[in-house]
């Protein structure tokens, strides 16, 4: 039998570091998505944030009665006889406390979808991985830049002297160099065999890499939230990029948020029809403001376009009159 693999402490630490970074980014992105919509009229047994988690993570939430109370459950399964679209007309789902929701959809149970494709919010997972990898790369470059150059010493005494100087500098203490070896190390005297500098990490390039990674992080963040209709202002943009070009993708950015809103409204209507509730759903305040700003930009664009057309027509008419009044000599 082969030797059993046992991870080293550094490998375990690196793994835990990755897990913590992943959890941090995932929690942030999921919390933001759970703030996209607000509900009115939800029963006390259905929490808005848990309902949004169910929809974003599983793509579907089943609403049904457990006893006399309404509950929501994720990962609902459609089964039984198929309708004309190949979807089961019955539903089975389990509330996290183990209670079950079962029945015919539209009669005993209502379902709400995350979008019209009935799919979960998978880009949260992918962008979380991207952010985690950028973080790890940034951290590695910072660490390598911090420890460059590496000092090599021919004896323990010189090694301890180097260590003492570096520790004092890191701590912010003033340091006086009295050792000839250290003087040589800092280039104040030429030639020594006791101390050498090994600069394998190219410190300036490492700092530049960190800047690139920081810009990449901003680009991914902007891309993530632009898919949700939000305009993220970052200090970096493409060269010669105008304000019109920056807002040129607004219409595309609002396709998906409006799709998600429609899917929730359809689901809420089913809940109201089945259980006689009066639940409503709409964008939250942040998204309402952004959507209003988008609509205002559309209106301003239409007004400007109409104005440009009128000015063009006026110029054309003026040119025509001038041509008609020309007399050949």
Image (cartoon, rainbow, N blue to C red):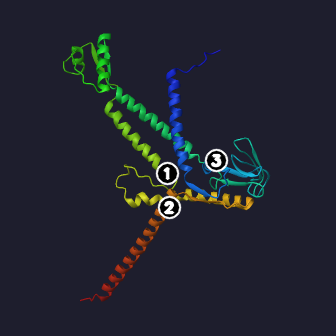
Q: In which quarter of the image is residue 140?
A: top left
Q: Name the residue under label 3.
A: 54
Residue 326 % position (x, y):
28, 87
On screen, residue 19 versus residue 47, left or right, reads: left
Label pair 1/2, CB-CB below 8 angstroms: no
Structural distance between the alpha carbons of marks 2 and 3: 25 Å
Marks counted in the figure total 3
Which comes sooner in the sequence, label 3 or label 1? 3
In the rendering, which numbered label is found on residue 291?
A: 2
Q: Mark 1 points at which residue?
A: 225
On screen, residue 314 versus residue 14, left or right, reads: left
Q: Residue furthest left?
A: 189
Structural distance between the alpha carbons of marks 1 and 2: 13 Å
Q: In which quarter of the image is residue 209?
A: top left
Indicate the quadrant containing the N terminus: top left, top right, bottom left or bottom right.
top right
Q: Residue at x 70, y 54 (%)?
A: 111
Indicate the quadrant containing the C terminus: top left, top right, bottom left or bottom right.
bottom left
Label pair 3/1, CB-CB below 8 angstroms: no
Which comes sooner in the sequence, label 2 or label 3? 3
Q: Which of marks 3 and 1 is in front?
A: 3
User: SS at mark 1?
Assistant: helix
């Amino acid at each position: 039998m082969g030797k059993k693999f046992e991870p080293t402490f550094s490998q375990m630490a690196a793994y835990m570091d990755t897990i913590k970074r992943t959890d941090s980014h995932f929690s942030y992105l999921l919390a933001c998505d759970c703030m996209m919509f607000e509900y009115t009229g939800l029963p006390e047994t259905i929490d808005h944030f848990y309902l949004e988690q169910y929809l974003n993570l599983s793509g579907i939430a089943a609403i049904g009665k457990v006893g006399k109370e309404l509950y929501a459950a994720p990962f609902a399964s459609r089964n039984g006889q198929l309708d004309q679209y190949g979807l089961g007309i019955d539903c089975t789902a389990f509330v996290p406390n183990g209670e079950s929701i079962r029945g015919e959809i539209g009669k005993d149970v209502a379902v709400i979808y995350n979008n019209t494709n009935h799919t979960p919010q998978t880009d949260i997972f992918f962008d979380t991985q991207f952010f985690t990898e950028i973080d790890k790369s940034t951290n590695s470059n910072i660490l390598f830049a911090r420890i460059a150059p590496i000092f090599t010493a021919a004896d323990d005494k010189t090694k301890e002297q180097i260590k003492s100087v570096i520790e004092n500098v890191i701590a912010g203490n003033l340091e006086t160099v009295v050792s000839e070896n250290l003087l040589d190390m800092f280039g104040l005297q030429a030639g020594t065999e006791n101390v050498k500098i090994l600069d394998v990490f190219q410190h300036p390039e490492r700092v530049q890499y960190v800047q690139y990674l920081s810009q990449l992080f901003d680009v991914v963040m902007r891309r993530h939230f632009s898919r949700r209709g939000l305009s993220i202002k970052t200090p970096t943009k493409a060269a010669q990029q105008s304000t019109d070009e920056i807002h040129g993708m607004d219409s595309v950015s609002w396709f998906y948020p409006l799709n998600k809103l429609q899917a929730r409204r359809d689901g809420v209507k089913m809940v109201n029809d089945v259980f006689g509730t009066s639940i409503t759903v709409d964008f939250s305040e942040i998204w309402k403001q952004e959507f209003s700003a988008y609509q205002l930009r559309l209106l301003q664009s239409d007004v400007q376009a109409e104005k440009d057309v009128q000015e063009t027509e006026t110029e054309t008419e003026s040119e025509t009159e001038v041509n008609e009044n020309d007399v050949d000599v």
